[in-house]
Amino acid sequence: MIEQILSDVKNYLCITFSDAATDQKLTSIIRRGMSYLQKIAGSSTLDFALNDNAMSLLLDYCLYANNFALSEFEQNYKSQLVALRLEREVSEFADETESAI
């Protein structure tokens, strides 16, 4: 999965060359971004391949991190981060309600 996300991130950042150091740097950024967004969503099982909002936020996280602007990411994407958290909570509530019936 990380290889596909790396390819998506490189495309999003307009990186057209392949370089081991760049790939390593981006892979590290991706892993940190995934961890951060999983923490925000309240789920260590957040699936970036299936959740378009999570993937979109991950791409933007990588953009900010690659440009040394992570301090601005949370402020600029606060509403989307809250929406990601609420989406996960609603999904979990629906699952709990469904299993209780």
Image (spheres, grey):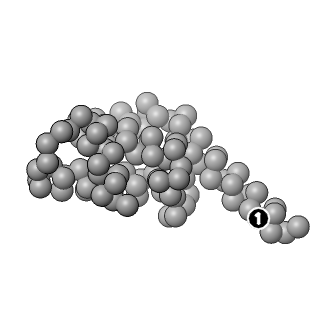
Is any part of residue 100 visible from this angle? yes
Taking depth in this image into account, of 24 and 77 the one nearest to the observer is: 24
- Left of 63 or right of it: where is 43? right
Q: Pick the quarter of the image with the C terminus.
A: bottom right
Residue drawn at 80 percent across, 69 percent down: 99
Residue drawn at 14 percent across, 48 percent down: 18
Is any part of residue 65 visible from this angle? no
User: Which amino acid type is shown beneath numbered disc 1?
Assistant: Glu
Q: Quadrant of residue 8?
A: top left
Picture coordinates of residue 94 (x, y %)? 76, 57
Element at label 1: helix
Picture coordinates of residue 67 (x, y %)? 23, 35
Residue farthest toward the bottom in the current orientation of the protein: 100
Name the residue tied to disc 1.
Answer: 96
Total residue callouts: 1
Residue drawn at 40 percent across, 58 percent down: 35
- Left of 97 or right of it: where is 12? left
Pointer 1: residues within 10 angstroms few (<14), some, or many (20+)? few
Picture coordinates of residue 44 (x, y %)? 50, 64
Residue 9's place in the image compared with 3, above or below, is above
Picture coordinates of residue 60 (x, y %)? 37, 38
Residue 77's place in the image compared with 40, above or below, is above
Q: Pick the quarter of the image with the N terminus.
A: bottom left
Residue drawn at 30 percent across, 58 percent down: 3
